[in-house]
Amino acid sequence: MATYAVDSKRQSMLATGVVNPVHEWEDTPDGSRRQSERQAIDEETHLPLWGVEVIYRTVSFDRELTARALVTVPVPLRPEIADYSPIEFGDLVASARATKTGQLVESWRAGGIASHTPRKDAGKATSGEKAA
């Protein structure tokens, strides 16, 4: 797998506001793998992993386009990030690998969130959640 460091200040990204827990993978009795209900924990920091959805501009086959990615980041609590706001990550890396079918898949990982705009409703209950 090829891994590249990405300067988050030079590769501008917008957070979509979508943040979800990253789940562990488990082997099933039939030999396949599936996501479990347990949230994954970072091996180095022992913090829970969160998937922060971002969009960014890129060039593919001489055409500019907007790409979407999920950046996995270890932080203690679910980040509350404003919709379509600028975001910077610390220690951001992108990895690329080929699947068994030959498809190229990229994954993004960061050591933390360097800066972002918090949601205006941060701390309030959202649909499906109960207020504390």
Image: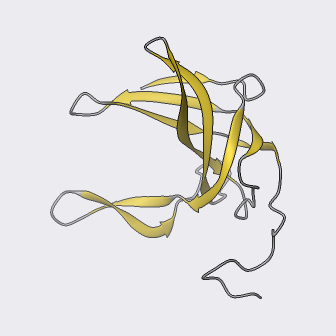
Q: From the viewer's side, name the closer residue of 64 and 105.
A: 64
Estimate the x, y position of residue 23 in percent, counting from the top left: 48, 61
Residue 22: x percent and y percent?
A: 52, 58
**Residue shown at 84%/64% (left/top)?**
120
Please say if 120 is above or below 117: below
**Would residue 9 be found to the left or right of residue 127 on screen?**
right
* Residue 15 placement (x, y as % from top left): 68, 46
Q: Is residue 131 left or right of residue 24?
A: right
Q: How many marks?
A: 0
Identify which residue is drawn at 76% across, 55% down: 82
Q: Closest to the observer: 77 or 69?
A: 69
Q: Which quadrant is the N terminus positioned in?
A: top left
Residue sitting at 75 percent across and 87 percent down? 131
Q: Quadrant of residue 27?
A: bottom left
* Above or below: residue 47 compared with residue 12: below
Residue 129 as seen in the image, left or right of residue 34 = right
Q: Is residue 68 above or below residue 122?
A: above
Q: Residue furthest top?
A: 62
**Residue shown at 80% from the left, 61% from the top:** 119
Taking 87 as reference, is 27 above or below it? below
